[in-house]
Image: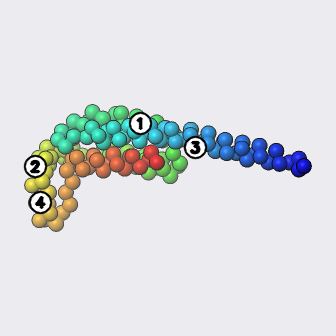
Amino acid sequence: MIPYIPIVGALIVGGVALYIRYKNRTQTPKDSFGVFIQEQIGALPQRGVREFYDRTKPSIRQAVQKVRHFLTDEQRGRLDRLWSEYDQIQAQEFDRAHEGTMGDVVRSLYKVAGAEFQSPYEIVRYYLDEFYKFSA
């Protein structure tokens, strides 16, 4: 009988256990972050986006700060840049005239002018979708 087989087996099992522990330690907070962001996406209204943005920004900031610890340096940098952009969305981007039916009219005018238009809903939804990518 070969005496080192149990030792090699124990090392392999120990390595797998450590990997699973590490993966669970980092994935659970990412999963919680993803669920939170999906809840925000589900609650995002077509109208009154400015109020939604103002009301949810502190809780989104808190969720971003919690998940940062579990990301790589590169992911952390991307998340920080994304948060900075989200945090500094200009008030004019939330113009109520760009919501609903008026938003459709404005979109068609932008199209005629050859410019790109995003409604307040589309702007906030873009950022929430980008935040969600950090939960993977």
Q: How far apart, in angstroms, are the residues tagged by discs 1 and 2?
A: 33 Å
Q: Is mark 2 on a helix, strand or loop?
A: helix
Picture disc at residue 108:
4
Say whether marks 4 and 1 touch (CB < 8 Å).
no
Residue at 43% of width from left, 39% of height from top? 33
The image position of residue 54, as x and y in percent, is 26, 36
Q: Earlier in the sequence, mark 3 or mark 2?
A: 3
The image position of residue 36, as x and y in percent, is 38, 37
Residue 65 in sight in this render: no
Splitting the image into 4 quarters, where does residue 64 fall?
top left
Q: Which of marks 1 and 2 is nearer the N terminus?
A: 1
Q: How far apart, in angstroms, are the residues tagged by discs 4 and 2?
A: 11 Å
Disc 4 packing (10 Å; few <14; some 14–19; many ≥20): some
Relative horizontal placement of residue 81, taking residue 4 as reference (left or right): left
Establish if 56 lies above or below 99.
Answer: above
Say whether marks 4 and 2 touch (CB < 8 Å).
no
Residue at 19% of width from left, 43% of height from top? 46
Relative horizontal placement of residue 52, taking residue 4 as reference (left or right): left
Q: Earlier in the sequence, mark 4 or mark 1?
A: 1
Eye-nearest disc, 1 or 2: 2
Q: Is mark 1 on a helix, strand or loop?
A: helix
Q: How far apart, in angstroms, are the residues tagged by discs 3 and 4?
A: 48 Å
Q: Name the residue under label 3.
A: 23
Q: How far apart, in angstroms, are the residues tagged by discs 3 and 1?
A: 20 Å
Task: Give amino acid for label 1.
Answer: Ala
Q: Name the residue under label 1.
A: 63
Task: Give amino acid for label 3.
Answer: Lys
Picture disc at residue 101:
2
Picture disc at residue 36:
none
Task: Give amino acid for label 4.
Answer: Ser
Q: How far apart, in angstroms, are the residues tagged by discs 4 and 1?
A: 36 Å
